Amino acid sequence: MQLVSAYDARRRFSALLIRARQEPVAITRYNRPAAYLISPREFRDFRRFQHRTKLEEMTRLVARLEAAGHNAPPGLYRELERLTKQANATLPANGA
């Protein structure tokens, strides 16, 4: 991974866009990562991972709700609603 200061990133942005197709580029401020420039493929993979993780959390929560039956605390239903919203927000566009 290439590290580039924010100052250099502004000056060489076009070159960094090309570089990001091959490997992530860390843009630093005060010698600490401030942002990462990644390829569209890597971003799609990341979004898929996020979505898959939320679905796995939802599956575990549904199992807990089913196990609790009518005695399920209301907080579990709120948690399921929250996870559903998050999963929908991370859903990859157009099957990407």
Image (cartoon, rainbow, N blue to C red):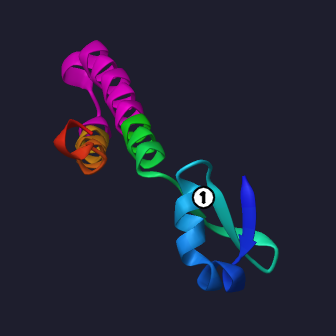
Q: Is residue 53 above or below residue 93?
A: above
Of all residues, the one furthest to the right in this rendering is 31
Where's the C terminus, which quadrant? top left
Q: Which x, y percent locates residue 50? A: 41, 40
Which residue bears the numbered disc 1? 19
Quadrant for residue 45, please give it: top left
In this rendered view, identify the residue nearer to me: 16 or 84: 16
Quadrant for residue 48, please give it: top left
Q: Which x, y percent locates residue 28? A: 72, 73
Magenta span includes 71 = yes
In this rendered view, identify the residue nearer to me: 88 or 3: 3
> Residue at coordinates 26% horizontally, 51% vertically from top-left?
89
Q: Is residue 77 above or below residue 86?
A: above
Query: What is the span of residues highlighted in magenta in the rendered image?
Result: 51-77
44 on left or right of 38 = left
Q: Which x, y percent locates residue 74? A: 25, 39
